[in-house]
Image (tube, rainbow, N blue to C red):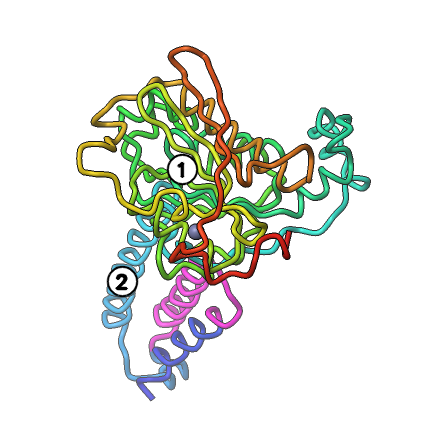
Amino acid sequence: MALLLPLGLLSIVAAAWVMGWGFLRVLAVLFLVWLIVLALMLAAPASEFTAFGTMDVRAWLAGGVILALILGYAGIVRNMRSKAVALWGDPQEQGRLPVPVRPGTLATDPEALERYGRHIVLREIGGPGQAKLRHASVLIIGAGGLGAPAALYLAAAGVGRIGIADPDTVSLSNLQRQIIYRSSDAGRPKAQAAGEAMRALNPLIEVQAMRRGIGAGDEGLLASFDLVLDGTDSFAGRRDINAACVAAGVPLIAGSISQWEGQLTTYDPASGGPCFACIFPQAPAPGLALSCAEAGVAGPLPGVIGSMMALEAIRQITGAGQNMVGQMLVYDGLYGETRRIAVTRRPDCPVCSGLGSGAAQA
Ligand SMILES: [Zn+2]
């Protein structure tokens, strides 16, 4: 009989669990029950209430104190965890497959009509183009100098679902060019901070922030997006992202920058263009391809190339104008010059030669 009360309390906790009660609500109910039992014990110590058990008031008080300590500790852990999630993101969210975009049309959404009005009046985009953007999904790999402006512009443009992946944290030296961050973001994970900035800019879109790199083995994740933007800065990373995109059959918009010069192209062997490995079959000799940290970079240059990547994504999604498949644009920021180079598929490319003839699929 002495077990009756603890069992009763346990069943309250179990019922609360099943019904999905909040922590504070369970706490309040347990405290209420404890208080009622205490009052009954004090009011009628010798009455039929003792049938509940042989426990006396002191044992009941001690039990209450122990329960309070356990629940207090659980509360502190819970509080710390929610603070950590707010700052660093939920680790269970990392790499999770994305939520589908909410259905809906521009015609039924006055906020979207006003927000995207300047796109809608463009003949090449219009209502149908804006609807394509809304139903499109884009993965941005690297939330650095190129990823920052691309992420902001694609969020602003109303691309319905945007993934942003980066394993790094924001450092003070990033702020010279990575304009999606604020000084207060220093030390925070880039994916988390960039994701928050995008959601704040446009709450109508879904943002999937992933605190990790993307490479070999991520074909499934890549295939869940319509387009991939590569803004990473190492040859090995670009090579792996290219191979995974070719395997997943997703077009890859690639930008790169160094010092004063930037490049932009779209790799899409499925539509007849080359892949990254067609153009860059070999890793550059050590010392020839310096990173931004080693060689330096003019702050607005990634802004130019990253914005061009966003523009290319909009062209690809809406079909406006001509995309950059088979063309590489080179921008010289020191002299303000651009030039375009035709790039072609290599028939013996080890990465994309398994695909059928581009002409047949184009
Ligand atoms: Zn290739």
Dividing the picture into quarters, in which one does residue 95 lie? Answer: bottom left
Please provide the residue range marked out in magenta. 16-45
Q: Which mark is residue 34?
A: none
> Residue 199 placed where, x, y %?
53, 37
At horizontal 56% and vertical 36% (from top left) the residue drawn is 324
In the picture shown, does residue 334 fall above or below 42? above
Q: Earlier in the sequence, mark 2 or mark 1?
A: 2
Total number of numbered discs in the rendering? 2
Q: Residue farthest to the bottom?
A: 1
Question: Foreground: 166 or 297?
Answer: 297
Residue 226 painted magenta: no
Please tell me whether mark 2 sits on a helix, a strand or a loop.
helix
The residue tagged 1 is: 231
Under tag 1, what secondary structure? loop
Q: Amino acid at mark 1?
A: Gly
Q: Is residue 67 left or right of residue 245?
A: left
Q: Which residue is mark 2?
A: 70
Residue at the far right in the pictured view: 107
Q: Residues within 10 Å of mark 2 (few under 14, many from 20)?
A: few
Residue beneath the point at 24% across and 72% down? 59
**Left or right for 133, reference 93:** right
Q: Quadrant of residue 203?
A: top right
Q: Is residue 298 left or right of residue 58?
A: right
Judge left or right: residue 315 versus residue 239: right
> Which image quadrant: the N terminus?
bottom left
Label 2 amino acid? Ile
For the residue pair 333 and 154, the one nearer the viewer reads as 333
Rendering coords of residue 302 (x, y %): 41, 25
